[in-house]
Image (tube, rainbow, N blue to C red):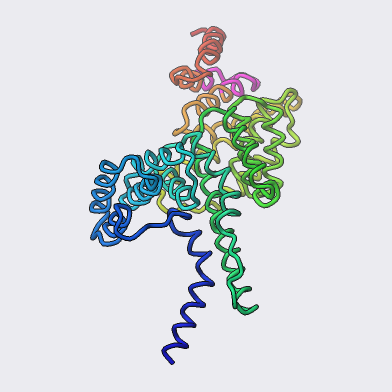
């Protein structure tokens, strides 16, 4: 009975060996008994806390700086500092390891975890993400063990496939977490292009995120045509993407010439509908959630105000526009730039009415003039004209 049990355990070990190697650090490294490397591994495995592990790694690195095992030590530094939530150190040692042309799936994923948990971003992080698919193929590729049954072999393949999918999925998650931290639109676009090549199914499997990524990058680069193109693709992939709908609506009203009211109006109304269904994300305070919701609503009302104002050019009925601009100004208290725009357009609407409402226009244009924004100059200029017309 004991012999049978031993054979069974051996079979299980053979079946899972390939999979475990893909999850453990330092694949391909072997440790000889009674060597400094063996002493290091015993110290790491026997340590009672991460601090003791770091001390053992420090001792080994200082005494054996020329050891061929040093890349593995750097990988352990990375994972240990990650456990300690010292993300800067984890990133430092992980990048140092990669700079020495050492690659390991475990190292790559731990480095990405450190980046995601920190506030940092670098070209190195994106380089790692792009290499993950090929590294998965290299490490998560088990051979059929001798004597394995068809059922056991199939199970091992399924487990390996799941491990591969999980590893790729984390790289994808890391990409979309880190991309918004890139402030250079040119680099954002380059990263998106590289991601689409490294993950061939990205454009279909992650269409909503990819298209919004391009949309945001082109918006940062002030490329209006491309912004609109990818914004349309983003809402086609995700019809509930409220922020993209809002930017598109605003752009069609204020940036496109002539204005595309046929899209600006329904998109802004879509935002109002979606905003009613907004749910507070976990970890976000009530105050911050209310500010964001009001900002989205205010921006949509600003767009609808402009749509109504353009229509008033034919009807001379500015009341609908005035109502929308007033609502927008009230909601945009936390967004000075857009609030100043709402006040400025509201002042224009008051002046457009017949007879002109000079006193009301002066009040809101004064508010717009007091806000530091791109609308401050135009507001002061119009305010002076209104005061002159009102004999003030």
Segment colored magenta: 347-363
Whole-percent x and y of residue 1?
Answer: 44, 92
Whole-percent x and y of residue 294?
Answer: 50, 41
Whole-percent x and y of residue 302?
Answer: 59, 32
Vertical placement of residue 360 versus 266, above or below: above
Look at 62% across and 38% down and name the residue there: 192
Q: 152 or 389: nearer the eye?
A: 152
| Residue 189 appears in the picture as rendered | yes
Q: 15 or 280: nearer the eye?
A: 15
Q: Main secondary structure of the magenta part?
A: helix
Look at 72% across and 35% down and name the residue there: 229
User: Would residue 48 be found to the left or right of residue 130 on screen?
Assistant: left
Q: 210 or 313: nearer the eye?
A: 210
Q: Is residue 150 magenta?
A: no
Look at 23% across and 48% down and name the residue there: 55
Image quarter of residue 327? top right
User: Would residue 11 be found to the left or right of residue 70 on screen?
Assistant: right
Look at 36% across and 50% down and name the residue there: 76
């Amino acid at each position: 009975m004991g012999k049978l049990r031993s054979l069974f355990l051996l079979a299980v070990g053979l079946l899972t060996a390939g999979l475990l190697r893909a999850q453990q650090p330092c694949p391909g490294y072997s440790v000889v008994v009674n060597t400094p490397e063996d002493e290091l591994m015993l110290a790491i495995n026997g340590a009672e806390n991460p601090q003791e592990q770091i001390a053992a790694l420090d001792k080994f690195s200082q005494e054996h700086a020329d050891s061929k095992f040093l890349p593995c030590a750097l990988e352990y530094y990375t994972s240990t500092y990650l456990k300690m939530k010292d993300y800067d150190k984890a990133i430092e040692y992980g990048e140092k390891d990669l700079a020495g042309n050492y690659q390991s799936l475990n190292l790559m994923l731990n480095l990405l975890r450190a980046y995601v948990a920190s506030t940092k971003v670098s070209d190195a992080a994106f380089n790692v993400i792009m290499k993950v698919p090929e590294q998965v193929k290299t490490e998560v590729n088990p051979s059929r063990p001798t004597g394995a049954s068809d059922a056991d072999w199939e199970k091992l393949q399924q487990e390996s496939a799941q491990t591969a999918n999980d590893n790729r999925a984390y790289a994808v998650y890391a990409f979309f977490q880190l991309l918004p931290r890139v402030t250079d639109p040119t680099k954002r676009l380059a990263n998106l292009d590289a991601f689409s090549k490294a993950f061939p199914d990205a454009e279909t499997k992650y269409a909503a995120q990819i298209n919004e990524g391009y949309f945001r990058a082109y918006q940062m680069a002030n490329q209006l045509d491309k912004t609109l193109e990818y914004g349309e693709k983003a809402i086609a992939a995700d019809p509930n993407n409220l922020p993209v709908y809002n930017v598109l609506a605003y752009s069609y009203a204020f940036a496109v010439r002539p204005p595309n009211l046929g899209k600006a109006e329904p998109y802004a109304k879509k935002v109002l509908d979606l905003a009613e269904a907004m749910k507070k994300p976990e970890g976000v305070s009530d105050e911050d959630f209310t500010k964001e919701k009001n900002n989205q609503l205010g921006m949509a009302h600003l767009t609808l105000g402009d749509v109504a104002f353009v229509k008033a050019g034919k009807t001379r009925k500015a009341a609908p526009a005035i109502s929308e601009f007033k609502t927008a100004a009230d909601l945009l208290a936390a967004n000075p730039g857009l609030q100043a725009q709402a006040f400025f357009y509201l002042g224009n609407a008051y002046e457009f009415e017949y007879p002109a409402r000079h006193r009301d226009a002066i009040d809101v244009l004064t508010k717009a003039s007091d806000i530091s924004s791109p609308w401050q100059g135009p507001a002061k200029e119009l305010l002076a004209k209104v005061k002159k017309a009102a004999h003030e």
